[in-house]
């Protein structure tokens, strides 16, 4: 188990990030496409050399050390197995390349194939494997190298819906039981919830959220965090202890989860299930009311999720309503409606 410290800056790709991963922990990195997640991983692995790349692993400075000597294993979206080798020899390649004898390497390979429940596949060639089986072999090969750090770049993204849960369960076992240090890049919050201790969100090459998986996914403070958590988020400036003001001057009231810095950036978060939808402005004085233009609808179990944009173009303004209500409101794209949510259902956090 080794602690990782990384500081990366790549002006050409718009990335500037610094992070520490404690030994024996799993950190999930999430973010939109092009945010810089994979570039960060390939830089740590030594496969990409930006202008600034200070990587320290277990007290070792990795500057000038080639990828194969870093004690880092990278598991990519595709298994990338050697097509001319058997499964056993694919896994044995890792210890063999580190100087182990042929017999010793095959013994290590057999042990790891048994660990990932794939010893019965040892004599097969990669073309004879399913996608899920091939990715299991890739996991075994990565771990056979006995890495100090395991990097996983969306390892489930190329698998079908049946194979992904099985690989997720396998990764949970091999990561948790041995207390391995790992970084997992993913788009799927289930991967973060099932595998990671900590979640980092990267957007436009910067770390915009960092905390426990539960905190980041239940109390998001960024647009992408809100999107994957399935909640609404409004951004603005603190206009009072329980209020923020959006760029257009609208006040959003809620309950402050912690002291808010006067005039500082803040976000208001509320669930789509807490939002009521009206064709016209409702009577009375609801605390939070947004005039939005309907952008789309989608089925979510027994409900319909309405998405729209307001005058601030706040991201992901959503409401979950029944199909009967959607029919009654006639919510075609482009229709203007009112979204109303109580202040008691709204939480405000410093951004």
Image (cartoon, helix red, strand yellow):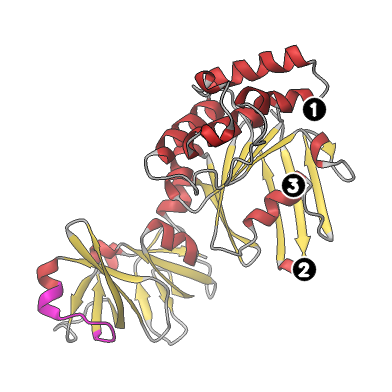
Q: Nearer the viewer, mark 2 or mark 1?
A: 1
Secondary element type, mark 2: helix
Seen in the image, is 257 located left or right of residue 91? Answer: left
Q: Are marks 2 and 1 in contact (CB under 8 Å)?
A: no
Q: Position of residue 114 (x, y in %)?
A: 54, 17
Q: Which residues are magenta?
A: 326-336
Q: Are marks 2 and 3 in contact (CB under 8 Å)?
A: no
Secondary element type, mark 1: helix
Determine which residue is flagged by label 1: 97
* Residue 11 - label: 2
Q: Is residue 183 visible?
A: yes
Given residues 187 and 68, the one toward you in this image is 68
Q: Nearer the viewer, mark 1 or mark 3?
A: 1
Given residues 282 and 53, the one toward you in this image is 53
Q: Position of residue 239 (x, y in %)?
A: 45, 77
Point out the tag, 2 or 1, that comes first from the N-terminus. Answer: 2
Determine which residue is flagged by label 3: 44
- Cα distance in 3D space between marks 2 and 3: 17 Å
- Residue depicted at x 44% and y 46%: 214
């Amino acid at each position: 188990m080794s602690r990782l410290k990384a500081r990366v800056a790549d002006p050409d790709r718009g990335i500037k990030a610094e992070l520490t991963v404690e030994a024996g922990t799993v950190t999930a990195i999430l973010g939109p496409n092009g945010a810089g997640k994979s570039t960060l991983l390939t830089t740590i692995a030594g496969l990409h050399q930006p202008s600034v790349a200070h990587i320290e692993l277990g007290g070792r400075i990795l500057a000038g050390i080639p990828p194969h000597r870093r004690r880092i294993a990278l598991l990519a979206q595709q298994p990338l197995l050697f097509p001319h080798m058997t499964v056993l020899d694919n896994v044995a390649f890792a210890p063999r390349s580190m100087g182990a004898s042929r017999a010793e390497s095959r013994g290590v390979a057999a042990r790891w194939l048994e660990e990932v429940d794939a010893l019965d596949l040892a004599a097969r060639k990669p073309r004879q494997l399913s996608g899920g089986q091939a990715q299991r072999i890739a996991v075994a090969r990565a771990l056979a190298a006995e890495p100090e750090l395991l990097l996983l770049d969306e390892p489930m993204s190329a698998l079908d819906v049946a194979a992904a849960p099985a690989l997720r369960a396998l990764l949970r076992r091999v990561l948790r039981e041995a207390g391995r240090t790992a970084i997992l890049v993913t788009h799927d919050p289930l991967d973060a919830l099932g595998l990671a201790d900590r979640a980092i969100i990267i957007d436009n090459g910067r770390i915009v959220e960092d905390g426990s998986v539960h905190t980041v996914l239940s109390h998001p403070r960024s647009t992408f965090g809100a999107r994957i958590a399935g909640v609404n988020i409004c951004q603005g400036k603190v206009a009072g202890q329980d209020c923020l003001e959006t760029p257009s001057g609208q006040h959003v009231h809620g309950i402050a989860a912690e002291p808010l810095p006067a005039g500082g950036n803040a976000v208001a978060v509320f669930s789509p299930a807490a939002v009521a939808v009206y064709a016209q402005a409702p009577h009375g004085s609801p605390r939070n009311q947004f005039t939005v233009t309907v952008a789309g609808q989608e089925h979510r179990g027994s409900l319909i999720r309405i998405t729209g944009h307001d005058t601030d173009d706040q991201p992901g303004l959503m409401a979950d309503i029944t199909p009967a209500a959607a029919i009654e409101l006639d919510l075609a794209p482009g229709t203007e409606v009112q979204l109303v949510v109580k202040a008691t259902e709204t939480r405000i956090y410093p951004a």
